[in-house]
Image (spheres, grey):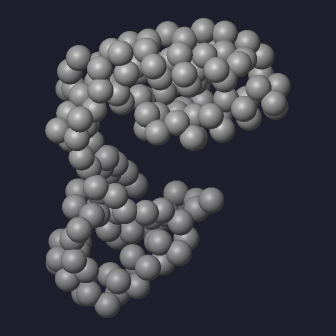
Amino acid sequence: MPDSHSLDETDRKIIRALQENGRMTNLNLAAKINLSPSPCLRRLKLLEQRGVISGYTVNIDAEMYGLPVTVMVRIRLDSHNEEVVGNFESHMNAAPEVLECYVMTGLSDYLLRVVVKDLKDYERFVRQRLHLIGGVASIDTSFVYGVVKRTHVFPEIEN
């Protein structure tokens, strides 16, 4: 895994610029970070090769796509042996409704971000995905009814 200290200010500028607009051309990227195009492209390719940049994606409005309900789901497992944990995590990786799954400290073992069409669709997710896994001790659900801030752009790091 790359060491964050091995990134310099120019690398971070490249990353932030691409987080703001991943479709930016190399020419525009170079101009934005005040670097000539050839060294900019070399740095970009190196960031990709090192795995610092692991891919490119597009941000979609979930409601317009047809999945207007976002649910935050806290999961507690009944035990933490390798089999139970591995089984749960493999099910989460296979569940298309689960956009993010975090291993947590505190009262819950996992925090999921789930998108569904409606309450009936969420009920189906719980009954046909979560309940069938086994090893789940509790499911605590919170429905998102508004978004205050959503960004994929990292903050600047001061030296």
Find residue 52 and report its horizontal and vertical position in percent. 49, 63
**Residue closest to the far bottom:** 38
Q: Residue at x 25, y 80 (%)?
A: 26
- Examine the rendering and report whether any part of residue 32 can be seen: yes
Question: Does 141 appear above or below 56?
Answer: above
Q: In the figure, is residue 121 to the left or right of 47? A: left
Q: Find residue 131 and report its image quarter.
A: top right
Find residue 103 and report its horizontal and vertical position in percent. 60, 30
The one of 151 and 158 positioned closer to us in this rendering: 151
Count up the numbered dots.
Answer: 0
Q: Residue at x 22, y 61 (%)?
A: 21
Query: Which quadrant is the C terminus positioned in?
Result: bottom left
Find residue 126 and report its horizontal and vertical position in percent. 50, 17
Question: Does 108 appear above or below 110?
Answer: above
- Examine the rendering and report whether any part of residue 107 can be seen: no
Query: Which quadrant is the N terminus positioned in?
Result: bottom right
Find residue 91 and report its horizontal and vertical position in percent. 62, 34
The one of 102 and 15 positioned closer to us in this rendering: 102
Q: Residue at x 45, y 19 (%)?
A: 124
Q: Find residue 62 and report its image quarter.
A: top left
Q: Residue at x 26, y 49 (%)?
A: 59
Q: In the figure, is residue 74 to the left or right of 41? A: right
